Amino acid sequence: AQSVTQPDIHITVSEGASLELRCNYSYGATPYLFWYVQSPGQGLQLLLKYFSGDTLVQGIKGFEAEFKRSQSSFNLRKPSVHWSDAAEYFCAVVPGTGGSYIPTFGRGTSLIVHP
Amino acid sequence: DTAVSQTPKYLVTQMGNDKSIKCEQNLGHDTMYWYKQDSKKFLKIMFSYNNKELIINETVPNRFSPKSPDKAHLNLHINSLELGDSAVYFCASSQDLRRGGLLEQFFGPGTRLTVL
């Protein structure tokens, strides 16, 4: 079974600083990979996704993520964080092959932004 | 123009009661989902329906029964509520995932269920 690890429960950054949120997955083949953001009291919103092709994907709100097959990672980055980016971030994996489309979410990383 | 809506937003009830949460999507999607998010923010899929057909049914107590009257609606009925059912329940929808449509899932705002 696939698993997703987000090793950082909380990350605190200053506004304007760069950000990297880590995500590692465990699965035999390359799965479909997603990053979602959840603002307080809201549902999840897709930031970006990777299916195949270019390993650096661009998303909304200035986020990008890089897929590294050798490290089984899909880390989320942003060059300059804004106070409105404070939220919970979830990495998700879907196998896709063998007819399995059951998504697995990481535990989430809470981003705190200091002024 | 709410894409995925859920009612109610908050639900407080006593142990042993039966309650329902409603979900509607106006995106024309074929697939709808129910997720449970616990107090530690862990998000786990419960069910998925595609065109009113159940296609994903994770290990969920049979006290939980999803009902899909049409492909735009997926309701969740919970019998004999227990303290451990307290959580935030999210509805979501996407295009038909079985035809390679596993694209963006659109989530509703969530229903916070508190069982006393």
Image (cartoon, grey):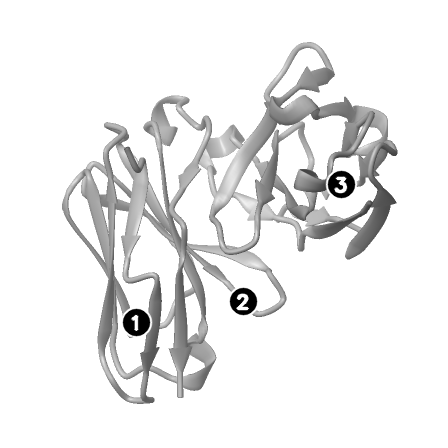
The residue pinned by badge 1 equals B62
How far apart in space, not on screen, are marks 2 and 3 (Cα)? 20 Å
Q: Residue at x 84, y 32 (%)?
A: A16
Q: Amino acid at mark 2?
A: Asp
Q: Is residue B77 above or below residue A50?
A: below
Q: Is residue B67 above or below residue B54?
A: below
Chain of the residue displaying label 2: B
Q: Which mark is residue A33?
A: none
The residue pinned by badge 3 equals A23
Quarter of the C terminus of chain B within the rendering: bottom left
In-front residue for pair B33/A19: A19
Residue B2 is drawn in which quadrant? top left
Chain of the residue displaying label 3: A
Measured from the top left, where is residue B18 in percent x and y?
A: 22, 79
Q: Nearer the viewer, mark 2 or mark 3?
A: 2
The residue pinned by badge 2 equals B38
Q: Residue furthest left?
A: B69
Residue B20 is drawn in which quadrant? bottom left
Q: Amino acid at mark 1?
A: Asn
Q: Residue at x 79, y 25 (%)?
A: A69
How far apart in space, not on screen, are marks 1 and 2 (Cα)? 19 Å
Measured from the top left, where is residue A48 in percent x and y?
A: 60, 26
**Mark 1 or mark 2: whose residue is earlier in sequence:** 2
Residue A56 in sight from this viewpoint: yes
Residue A8 in sight from this viewpoint: no
Q: Is residue A77 above or below residue A40?
A: above
